[in-house]
Amino acid sequence: MLFLIAIIVAGLFSWFCADALRKHPIPFYITGTLLSIVMILLNQMHVQFTPVFSTYVIGLFNRGALAAALWCVVAWVGALPDELKEIRKKLLPARGELSIFSALITLSHAVVYGISYVKRLFSGRSPETDFILTCVICLALMLIMIPLTVISFKAIRKKMNGKTWKNVQRAAYVFYALIYLHIMVILVPRAQQGREGVLLSVLVYTIVFAGYAVCRIRKAFIKKKRPESKTALNGICTAVLLLITSAMGISSRAANVPTETTERTIPTESVSSAETSAPVSETASTPETETVVESEKITETENESVSVSETISETETLSETSTETSTPDISVSESTAETQKVSETQTSSAETSVQETTAVQEEAPQEQQNEEEQQNIQDEPAEENPVQEENQTPEPEPEPVNTIYNDGVYTAEEFGYDSTVYITVTIENDVITDISATCEESDMYYFEVAYPIIRNAMLSSQSADVDAVSGSTYSSDALRNGVRKALDSARK
């Protein structure tokens, strides 16, 4: 988190440079002014650096993180409890010079975003309520900071009445409160949208600024009431700080709103690619048709086998019946020549039927085999006339389609206005089917204006070479360069 880094930098600078800053403030003032001018020029010239350098070096100045951290040090020096005498003794003498240096560092943030806000106000688009509130707060902050900085110079302070100077300095309490309000107006809506890391930022800022307010009130109470024991007071202060932090965390928590499905603009080229793939699916269905034909053949063969077996069983029944008829128990004394002839005739007919049945059993497999061979001959494609084959010229084989990109999802990073922009490009059959991008700009207005226009233009043209959106040059460049990087990584 940028603010935590800024707190560490501001704390180390204040501790190790306090004595030098108090004794020789001019070099520090010049350095602070030059740093602000350089950061402003880098922003306006849009000089490209690595994302790490842009975020954690330039971002410390232009996003106001370092300025806010320095103001926190100035505020906390006056609110530290008396028990921390060593820290107070070290930092309190240089508090005026430190506040001037903080104001000079704040210039880069104020000028960079001042230019951005003025452009936005005159862009012709209706401003949102949050933006109007932010502009009012920033204007009030500058109107308070400038006089407080001027009267912090020792030469001017000596010319002022002590009581008047002290009364003017009390405006610093309003100044610190407006800094926190300015930050919350920007961060709380983002935290409610569920952006990663923003809720933690809300909690850290709340602990720092609300902790300062609680400690300042505690110190004023002790100075006025002079209680013998501070245990109960410390417990109350801790409980109040936890209550304020918890309330801000709960109010800034992301709402569980179902994610709406976004419509993706797919170019017409993807439709043609889908139509091209249709013959492939038809070809793939041919084996299924052959399988059905083969299964029908097997079913016919099984039916023929069943009919043959039924014929055999009927013949066996007849033979058994005839055999039973021919084998009654007839005594020799009662038999006559005619009955003997009849029985002989029946016996011979039964034998004949058994022989025919056996012949049918032997011929059935042969007939079945002949029928299968005929069906196979019918299924086989007729041989083409060799003379015609010689006369016909062979058809040329289709040439393989050469694709430029590999299918898949490719990502890239580019630094935008004051934050890294994360771009994702989806490619299928050499077609850019989707482009998505996210970032954590301190002012999301320009990115939100440029993103849908640039995205639709790229999807329509299937290229990253599209026009920038007027007024959102940094975001447009980040989106275009990021898509170019993603396409380069997808190239074969």
Image (spheres, grey):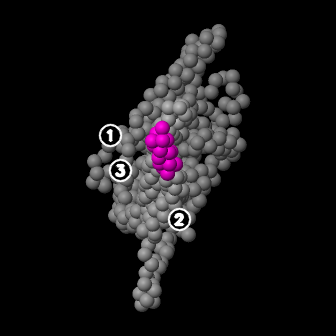
Q: Amino acid at mark 2?
A: Asn
Tags 2 and 3 touching, CB below 8 Å = no
Tell which of 107 and 377 is nearer to you. Answer: 377
The Cα atoms of the two marked residues, 2 and 3, are separated by: 24 Å
Q: Relative to 430, is 17 above or below?
A: above
Tags 3 and 1 touching, CB below 8 Å = no
Which one is closest to the eye, mark 2 or mark 3? 2
**Which SS class for mark 2?**
loop
Tell which of 427 and 373 is nearer to you. Answer: 373
Give the residue pinned by disc 3: 263
**Which SS class for mark 3?**
loop
Indicate whether residue 145 is drawn in magenta: no
Q: Is there any visible trace of residue 90 in the rendered image?
A: yes
| Residue 1 lies in quadrant | top right
Residues in magenta? 336-353
The Cα atoms of the two marked residues, 1 and 2, are separated by: 45 Å
Q: Residues within 10 Å of mark 2 (few under 14, many from 20)?
A: some
| Residue 285 lies in quadrant | bottom left
Of label 1 and label 2, which has the lower sequence position? Answer: 1
Q: How many marks?
A: 3
User: Would you say 44 lies left or right of 58 here?
Assistant: left
**Which SS class for mark 1?**
helix
Task: Tell me the quadrant of the picture where the C terminus can be found.
Answer: bottom right
Q: Measuring 47% from the left and 26% from the top, which residue is drawn there? A: 250
Residue 406, numbered circle? 2
Q: Is there any visible trace of residue 424 in the rendered image?
A: no
Of label 2 and label 3, which has the lower sequence position? Answer: 3
